[in-house]
Image: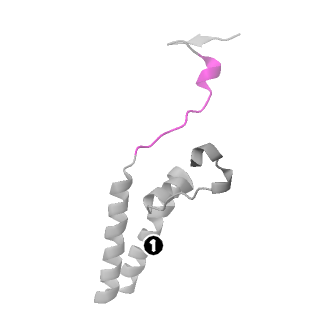
Amino acid sequence: MRILKGRGRSVSDARQPRASVVPISLLRVRVKLCVLAALTAAGVISGVAIWVTLAMTLACLAVPLAVATLGGAELVRALFLIPRTVNMESLRKDVLA
């Protein structure tokens, strides 16, 4: 027995978790990562305080970690523009032709 609550959704449907999709622009994240890396390198070259350099380095490491948490390995590959490798043996012969 399904009990409908508003707009035709049943109680059992309401308890199902929905997948949340967070739209992020990889280009924007990539630009921010490059800026953080450039600022970290400039800090090392110019000799700023070690804690500033360490904080910028940790921020550079946190960006790919946050992207991986949000979208997994596939999104991290897309962030670093690494093409996905294809196993040629698993492809069918007619696809290769």
**Picture quarter with the N terminus:** top right
Question: Which amino acid lies under the numbered mark 1 shown in the image of this protein?
Answer: Leu
Q: Which residues are magenta?
A: 10-23
Q: Residue at x 28, y 88 (%)?
A: 46
Q: Residue at x 59, y 23 (%)?
A: 14
Is residue 66 rendered to the left or right of residue 41? right
Look at the image and say whether residue 21 sits in the magenta stretch.
yes
Q: Which residue is mark 1?
A: 58
Towards the viewer: 86 or 93: 93
Look at the image and say whether residue 22 sits in the magenta stretch.
yes
Residue 81 image point, x, y percent = 44, 61
Q: Main secondary structure of the magenta part?
A: loop
Q: Residue furthest front?
A: 97
Q: Is disc 1 surrounded by few (<14), some (14 to 19) or many (20+) residues within 10 Å?
A: few
Quadrant for residue 13, please give it. top right
Quadrant for residue 57, please give it. bottom left
Towards the viewer: 94 or 25: 94
Badge 1 marks a residue whose secondary structure is: helix
Towards the viewer: 69 or 28: 28
Residue 3 image point, x, y percent = 64, 11
Residue 74 image point, x, y percent = 53, 54
Q: Residue at x 56, y 56 (%)?
A: 73
Q: Looking at the image, is 4 positioned above or below residue 32?
A: above
Quadrant for residue 88, please give it. bottom right
Q: Looking at the image, is 18 positioned above or below residue 5?
A: below
Q: Residue furthest right?
A: 1
Q: Residue at x 45, y 72 (%)?
A: 58
